[in-house]
Image (cartoon, rainbow, N blue to C red):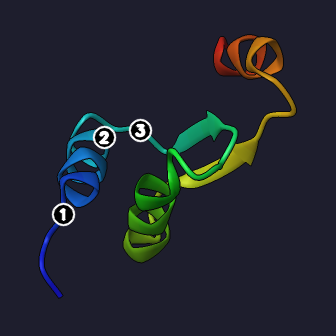
Amino acid sequence: MARTGADVLVEGLISRGVDHVFGMPGSHSTAVYDALGRCGRIATVLARNEQAGAFMAFP
């Protein structure tokens, strides 16, 4: 399978120590979520809306 832009994005996140991603999966982000699933190293956290995701992302 060919490497996609989403795969490159996920590789960059891993190289920067990211271990969680907060978001709202949808048609616009399917490729990114597919790449996250393929890598298996970054956990995804479902946010119900953008405001909740922003609050969850802050330590």
Disc 3 versus disc 1: distance between alpha carbons?
A: 19 Å
Provide the residue designation for mark 2: 13
Judge by depth and name the residue closer to the eye, 42 or 34: 34
The numbered mark at residue 18 is: 3
The amino acid pointed to by label 3 is: Val
Q: Where is 19 relative to 34, above or below? A: above
Provide the residue designation for mark 1: 4
Marks 3 and 2, the one that precedes in the sequence:
2
Q: Where is 37 relative to 33, above or below? A: below
Dividing the picture into quadrants, the one containing residue 51 is: top right
Q: In what quadrant of the picture does the C terminus appear?
A: top right
Q: Residue at x 14, y 71 (%)?
A: 3
Dividing the picture into quadrants, the one containing residue 24 is: top right
Label 2 near label 1: C-beta < 8 Å? no
> Residue lying farthest front?
27
Q: Which residue is drawn at 51% across and 58% down?
A: 30
